[in-house]
Every structure is written in structure tokens, then in C-alpha cells.
Amino acid sequence: MECIQLITKTGCFDVDDIFLNTIGGILGYLVYALMQRKRDRDADARRLKERS
């Protein structure tokens, strides 16, 4: 959205918004990846326990 505002010269373009949105996206992905890894490990542990 910020890039569109820069190109069309409409609205209020702010470089900080691009930076903060990028950091937020990266942090959100890292939280998702960590939770997915934990979920996979828990599922693997349950499968191993069922086999025993």
C-alpha cells in the first residue's frame, strides 16, 4: 500500500510504515514457524507413544 501511495503521490507515504510492516510480517512468520515445529514434534511424540 505504501508503495502505491509513493508512486501515485496520493495519501501519506511513510518509510517507517514499510519498515514496521516488514518487521511485523517477519515476526509473525517466526511465531507461526515455531508453533508449527512444536505441533509437529508433539504429533511425532504421540505417534511414537502409540507404537510402544
Image: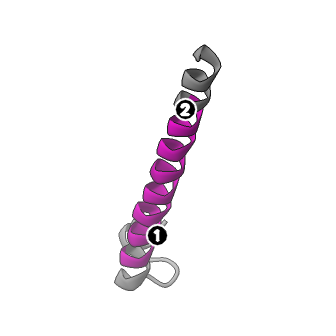
How crowded pointer 2 is (Cα within 10 Å; few <14, some 14-19, many 20+) is rated as few
Instruction: Tell me if residue 9 comes above or below residue 42 in the rendering.
Output: below
| Callout 1 amino acid | Gly
Give the mark, 2 or 1, whose residue is nearer the N terminus. Answer: 1
Residue 11 vs 31, above or below: the answer is below
Disc number for residue 24: 1
- Disc number placed over residue 45 in the picture, else none: 2
Q: Which residues are magenta?
A: 19-43
- Residue at the spot 49% in from the left edge and 77% down from the top edge: 10
Q: In the image, what residue type sits under mark 2? A: Ala
Please tell me which residue is depicted at 58% across the width and 17% down the height of the picture. Answer: 52
Q: Is residue 49 found inside the magenta-colored segment of the image?
A: no
Question: Residue 9: where, in percent of width, then height?
Answer: 42, 76
Question: Viewer-proximal residue, 42 or 3?
Answer: 42
Disc 2 + disc 1, Cβ < 8 Å: no
Q: Is residue 7 left or right of residue 28?
A: left
Residue 7 image-quadrant placement: bottom left
The image position of residue 20, as x and y in percent, is: 42, 77
Q: Residue at x 64, y 19 (%)?
A: 50
